[in-house]
Image (cartoon, rainbow, N blue to C red):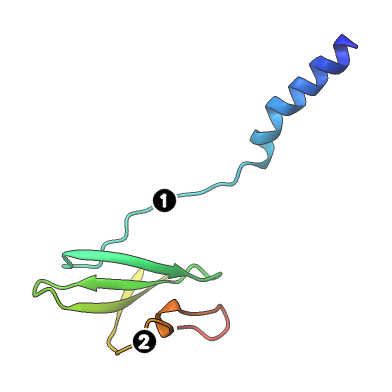
Amino acid sequence: MRQIIKMTLLCLAISPLLSAADYRFVRIDFPNATQTLANGINARGDIVGRYLDAEGVAHGFLLHKGAFSTIECRLTEHDRRWSNAKEGI
């Protein structure tokens, strides 16, 4: 009986290590922006969001494979909810 309890405790202690996800957090700063806010990420890892320039004007951005692109458009709140992996943004 003691061996069963020891084995159960050992399995419970080891199980989080076996199923732990590998997450990595990185800072996202649009170049020369005063503020950057990421709003979403798709399955490919593309990140969309918005940033404020030095004049305080908001712009959209796409971060794809480490390169930022500015997105200039007027979107409704519903449109900003963003993209899927097949259609882009």
Between 78 and 34, the one nearer to me in the picture: 78
- Which residue, as the protein is rendered here, is positioned at the far front? 77
Residue ID at (45%, 71%): 46
Q: What's the CA distance linking mark 2 and mark 1? A: 29 Å
Asked where in the image residue 31 lies, by quadrant, the reply is bottom left
Are circles 2 and 1 on residues that touch, CB within 8 Å? no
Which is more foreground, mark 2 or mark 1?
2
Residue ID at (12%, 73%): 56
Q: On screen, 46 above or below 3?
A: below
Q: Work out which quarter of the rendered image holds the C terminus and state it.
A: bottom left
Q: Is residue 51 left or right of residue 21?
A: left
Q: Which callout, 2 or 1, points at the residue further toward the start of the chain?
A: 1
Circle 2 SS class: loop
Residue ID at (64%, 34%): 17
Q: Is residue 31 left or right of residue 78?
A: left
Residue ID at (56%, 69%): 43
| Count of picture labels | 2
How dense is the environment of label 1, judged by Cα within 10 Å: few (below 14), some, or many (20 and up)?
few
Q: Residue under label 1, please give it.
A: 25
Residue 72 x/y as whole percent: 27, 87
In the drawing, what numbered circle is on residue 76?
2
In the rendered structure, which amino acid carries the disc numbered 1?
Answer: Phe
Residue 86 x/y as whole percent: 58, 83
Q: Is residue 80 left or right of residue 9?
A: left
Q: Work out which quarter of the rendered image holds the N terminus and state it.
A: top right
Asked where in the image residue 36 lies, by quadrant, the reply is bottom left
How dense is the environment of label 2, judged by Cα within 10 Å: few (below 14), some, or many (20 and up)?
few
